[in-house]
Image: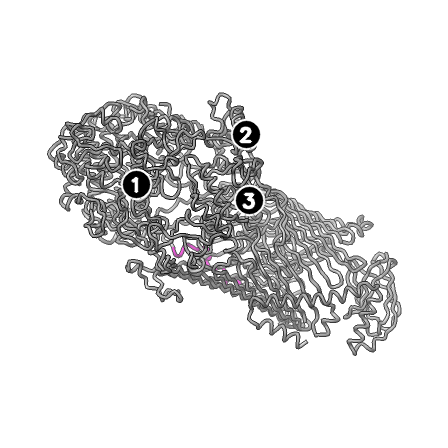
Amino acid sequence: MDKKIRLVKLNRQRKFDKFAPVIRLGMLLFFVMANVSANALSSNIGETRQSKALENRISIADNSSNEQQGRKVTGKVSDSKGATLPGVSVVLKGTTIGTITDANGVYSLSGVSDKAILEFSFVGMKKVDIAVGNKAAINVSLEDETIGLEEVVAVGYGKQKKENLTGSVAVVNSKELESRPVSNAGQALQGLVSGLDISQSGGYLENKPSFNIRGMGSIGGNSSNSPLVLVDGMEDDINNVNPNDIENISVLKDAAAASIYGSKAANGVILVTTKKGKDGKVRVNYNSNFRSSSPIRVPESLDSYTWSLMINQGMMNRPGASQPFIYPAVLQRVKDRVEGKSNIEMIPDSNNPNMWDMSYQQFSANTNWYDVVYNKSAPSQDHSFSITGGTDKVNFYLSSQYLGETGIVKLGGENFNRYNINAKIEGKIAKWATVGYNLKYTREDYDAPSYLNGQQIAYMSGYNFWPIVPVKDQNGYYIRNDVGSSLMMMDGGRKNHQIDWTTHLFNVTLEPMAGWKIFANVNVQSTNSFYHSDTQIVYNHDVLKNPFNIDPSNVGSVNESGNFSTYIAPNVYSEYSKSFKDHNFKIMGGFQSEIYKSKGLSAGRIGIMLPSKPTINTTSGLDASGKAQPPSVGDYINASSNAGYFGRINYNYKEKYLLEANVRYDGSSNASPDARWQWFSSYSGGYNIAKEDFFNNIVHYINTLKIRASYGELGNSQTNGNLYLSTMPTQASGSGWLLNGAKPNVAYTPGLLSKSITWEKKTTYDIGVDLGFLNNRLTVTADLYRLKTTNQISQGMELPAVLGTGAPLTNVLASEDNGFEMDLTWKDKLINELQYSVKFILSNNRTKILKYPNPTNDLGRYREGTYVGEIWGYTTVGIAKNDQEMTDHLTAMDPGGTKGNQSTLGTNWKAGDIMYKDVNGDGVISSGAYTTTDHGDLSVIGNSTPRFKFGFDLNAAWKGFDIRVFLQGVAKRDFMPWGSTFWGYEGNGGSEWGTQIQKVHMDYFRNDPNDPLGVNLNSYYPRPIIADSKNEQAQSKYVQNAAYLRVKNLQIGYTIPQLISNRVGLEKVRVYLSGENLFTFTKLSKLYDPELLDYQWGNGNVYPFSEVLAAGISINF
Amino acid sequence: MKIQKIYIAISVLVLLFSFSCKKEFLDKPYLDQIAPEDYFKDDGQLAAYTIGLYGNIQPAGFGGAGYFAADVTTDVMCAWTVPAEYTDNQYKVPQNGWSWNFGSIRSVNYFFDKVLPLYKANAISGNQELVKHYIGEAYFIRAMIYFGKLQALGDFPIVRHPLPDQSDVLIAASKRAPRNEVARFIISDLDSAIMLMNDQSPDGRRNRLSKIVAQVLKSRVGLYEGTWEKYFKGTAFVPNGTGWPGATKDYNKSYVFPSGSIDNEIEYFLTQAMDASKAAADALDASGGLVPNTYYMQQDPAQAPNLYFNMYSATNMTDYKEILLWREYGMSLGIKNTKAAYQGTDGGGAGVARGMVDRFLMANGLPIYDAASGYHSDDSIQSAFKDRDFRLQLFMKTPGQLNVLYHSANEDHVVTTELVPNVTNVGSVGPYVTGYMSRKGMSLEGIQWSINNQGSTGDIIFRGVEAYLNYIEASYEKTGSIDATADKYWRAIRKRGGVDEDYQKSISHTVMTKEALNDWGAYSGGQLVDPTLYNIRRERSCEFNSEGYRHADLKRWRAMDQLITNKYHIEGFKIWGPMKNWYDPAILVYNDPNNNNNVSDPARSKYLLPYEKKTSDLGYNGLGWKKAHYLEPIAVHHFLITAGTSQKVEDSPIYQNPGWPIVADQPATE
């Protein structure tokens, strides 16, 4: 045991290098395989023999067991109704010696000593321990354990038996978050709860997922749609929580469940409960995994020769063009480079032979920029450690986690580290009083090139990342040619930040008399963060290898900011429960408030004196001309507060008829004094039909049948800042109109504010049903809901232009979300000890506009009665295979040639161009007035709202082996791609500089038999034309089916038999291999990631997600 | 014991309640923002607000070359595609937007609303001269914004205060004031500005406004409105003219001119122009007058620079007294522009038309067609420019000349020596749309071609010579003769430009039918103007070549009527003369069966026809005109949202400009 711990310690101490994970992975694999083979051998032998074999191994191994010569014990196991139960596991407690009841429910176990305890367990039944004593026959009757529905779940300010819930609440337990090689708890939660959408805007390490419950909700754009996240009762960021600390998560979806939290809970609530100390012996858990990440769905690049041929084609098709983009001489050079006949990637400038010719049209490299930019495998590691224990008076839970991640961007490198410490202590100071204290500390460190940002990623597919552009000059120096170049990533400076969250939770629970409890707690969180970024002078080298500053105006700069915020939330509430015969009452009432204050200071100065010391102190403040420029400084102070009084009444009769009412009176500093305080209430009821007498006969088949209904109203105080106070926009040294060579102070006109503005209101109707079949092996929870969001804050009625400014924000928009959610779980254990469970979740939601001032019915704005996400476009007939086909098409549409046919979209229609359908038959393709009444040939060709979101979680365990397959996806979604990412070429107003030609774009129309790329008449893409979008209209042919299924997680684990782990002093050892984002099935164009469609920068480029492979170990002792 | 427990419990409850129940617990106003009522308390705050409005006085531009390419919408310059206003039906009534907007007007009015009461109450601290000056700046800026509206739309609502967000008030405020009232409003704002502003700009380097700038603008506005009303008299384009759409609305039906008649209005505006330009010119003369010309194009760093050339590309324009207002750029501050580099290459896609080149006189003062002129020929760019008005030689590119004299390691895409015009390539440098290329604003310093053509040459916003030109034209338009003051100004301009001062010689040798061939300014209302007036216009055109004044001038002169019946074929250089040998014949494509032409057909003209290369080009049949195009249409949406509940455009107080329908995407009817 000591040796093992020492090894673990050694591993932790050893500096992490790139070989370490490989070595460790190898060790783990060896360990796993050794045990697998041992087990495989024994599993071929029959049940009893296996037990014997194990028994023998124990006998040999453990001298203390020698006395267990024992005797034989037999018996019969039945359920509470007297039916015999086959397949019940009967085990000698503390060992793996055991057997299973046969078809008649009979078991027989030999080698049982008097001291032994027999453990009877069966899925869906409560476990029973029976001391053997001198008994030879032990008959047992097992009671039903109502899986899931029996459990107690966290609800607002309290707990509730799931059976008695009347609101819509979903629960996730720690098991479901286990062993996932993800960066934060948010990522692990994705796809586990129906109706909870979790999305992330890209693969940046510092990116954190955002949450949404039940669809769009507020679409006005001025109120938050994020649910309230409470960690142990305090508002916090779930992504800062160590996933291993999580005990369970409750998601309160409807207003009935959430309304007790008031105006911040309008978008639902996520309650995270972390683990706490347990009485009994001290338990230690150590979890560790090593990961390797590689980018997924990165487009395939072209070699630069093919690329050149394609851009030339796009150029030659352009009206007025007669010369290719890549001249023949350069094209030959490119070809030679691709074929390996030459190493020339750039040439000296003909005007100035000492300088390299930096014209893009002169480059002849053959670069795969995705290989240059992205790592094939970026290592990460995650270690967490927890220790828990206690007595009946005091218990504690201590844990810590270290997560060290490397980003997939290779140039310059991106690093993220997170450290967590969590300490909980709880003491019973009197029979009627308990106090608890919890300290949570999280540190986040992030470090990346200053130039790594959305724009950078966009440039990666833009012209800086054309394959002809070299990475280095002919002398081997990295070159900069523009903002997005490799040199800027390498040498352009670093940005980093450090954030510390320190949270103290202090709570007191009093129970002055039976049934009456008082809970008081004060939660404090302080956040300190420090941001740094520097821009360095970047040097290019001339032909003679002399360095020179490429941007003479750049003298380097350092910018830093420090931010400090505190959040204080005192709460007090009290509950009293009382039963009169079968009438059960519970009332609860309390008060909550919170104050949030933040301050920050920022400063920056130009003129880095020593590149190795990028601090403000070591800047000169001098610009390129030697003139002193004032440093930039700024600060901010924010404060906001909320207060609320709340109450709840629960009543049930025999737990059969359930009623609940919540009320809350809430105030927020975000609202104007006139609209500051508001009342909200919610009501819900449930009927546990299965508890009725007439159900007794079938209760064994249908254990649970509950119907629920709820109605509730909530206001949303989470507006974008306060919207009722006017401010004067001023900016010190902020004007671009220079005076005496410096930026003067500037002030602008304040915007108009509406004095009548008030909170938006959310009204939820929910009906649900909870079902349990076959001893609750199969459980179903389904909800149907309607969410009306009225009084949404948006730009008001359009006013005459003479006003001179936009109409102020007012409560003008209303929308409605209709949807359903379904959770289906099947859990079972088979005779051969195979345990498995299948969980399937499905949700759907659509948002409809109920009210919006758009009297002209402009298609570009919300229109009443329509669903959000409509895609309007033309209908494609096809790509004309030859000129005649196009001419016929145009003539058929517009026989006289007077109406315009396709001329509104462009001219010079020929083979390879799109034939659009004249939907309204007026002889001309047009978008009309772009209104509902006159939309020309446009029609709705799809809807971009993701529909039928599903998750599929399959778990199986057999004799120490476990496997999990977790799939997640969207069954229906349309996406109309746009821009040069999709088309390869820029349309109207664009130029050759924006082309982003990738391999998929090669499938374009070619009808010239001499084309070096070959003829392609049945192409996907039309003929390419740079700076012309006539073929690139939104149209039916190119609407993408964005439905997908992603293997989010696949893990295989093996728990080393306790016999073995006990021998080295460990209670439980599990090793596993876990993979994240392993496969994606979708018909979507390879240029896109289906999960990132809403997060495209500019033309549609994102930092890709990663596939993560991990090997890990979990040890308890 | 039980009682004790309850006491403890209750005290915990009370304690926590009291913790958070302070009064005003929920009052959290912004702690780090200034409330509007606390602003405008000293001169510096006034200065900060008005500088934020300076974007309104910056000249409009085209492409990367900025205002040096703004003439592309006229007869003197061409872009890659023909401007919509000269096509048969590409200029259409928009659905929404365009010039009917009031954002910047609101911003200035907000200033007056807040500042004037404080000023009258003596409640603004600081240097009172500066307080006055900044209020004057706001008047100037409002005048500048309104002048833009006057040029684009003519009749326009006069709004003096920020309006509330109430539909009925806004609909009432949407009534259009007759254009002469708008012009008078502008002049009254400028009078306030002249009264309030200092003689010198407060920054000392003319990066801010000063009195003389307001005088020049006043002369510009007076001249604009005076000549407009003169040439459009009696038409639908002036109040009370035949078919004036204002008469269709009750509020304008019985409009009476403040001076009694349109003739008195014309006289009033021209007088305002003369007085203001004289005042400005006097002030300019007192400070040193025009920047001198050395009459050579500097080609060697050792040579003394020609300040007349360098004036347009200086990074610090303080020493050029002729520049009355300029905007400074700073590379280190990230405030950059691309004008110099684009003027060094393809003009941002703008080329100078043959007509512009041909109208320059010979240095001896004679027109090129005059038998005694000594004109060489336009067989080559070099010979065309030889012995001409020096402004042509100085500000137009000639192949073989050095563009960059001062090199820098950081220059990017520099074209050190001017090549033959690249008329076909659509790649990195080029095309030269017409073959003739302006280089006004080009810099001799390679550093002005830094990364992506970024540079920091200043913007000239007002140039003193305009006062001279405005005086000459306004006085002649008013009196029909050249007075002594005008004579002095004209000679000064010609002398500096490098052409014989004797303008009478040029006038007497001018043949209007020849000038009319490729100068729209030879016409007003479809009639040829007299040679004196023509030569005044010629002077203005030559001095302001590539400076963006042409479009406004053509409109106020009503110089496009002749295009209604006779389409105009705008030409570039003489590509199908000997200069065709400058190119590989394989490169020049015309008569291509696939219409992939990159030059025009020699059968159509020896000169390059930039808008007539392909039969599918919108300008293939020449540039035409419709009367309505003298003013912009007002977007349909503005009628709809002011129509009240009826949603009928005719119920709006707004009326459409002459010749334009109130239907989206429809071209003008006449």
Q: Position of residue B276 (x, y in %)?
A: 18, 37
What is the magenta range?
B16-32
Tag 2 residue: A917
Identified by mark 3, the residue type is Val
Q: Chain of mark 3?
A: A
Do marks 2 and 1 share a subunit? no
Give the label, 3 or 1, closer to the camera: 3
- Marks 3 and 2, how far apart in space? 26 Å
| Element marked by disc 1 | helix
Q: The C terminus of chain B appears in which quarter of the rendering?
A: top left
Give the residue at mark 1: B67
Residue A1115 picture location, percent across and down: 66, 69
Subunit of label 2 = A
Q: Amino acid at mark 2?
A: Lys
Q: Is residue A602 visible?
A: no
Residue mark closest to the camera, 3 vs 2: 3
- Total numbered badges shown on the rendered structure: 3
Q: Which mark is residue A1000?
A: 3
Q: Secondary structure at mark 2?
A: loop
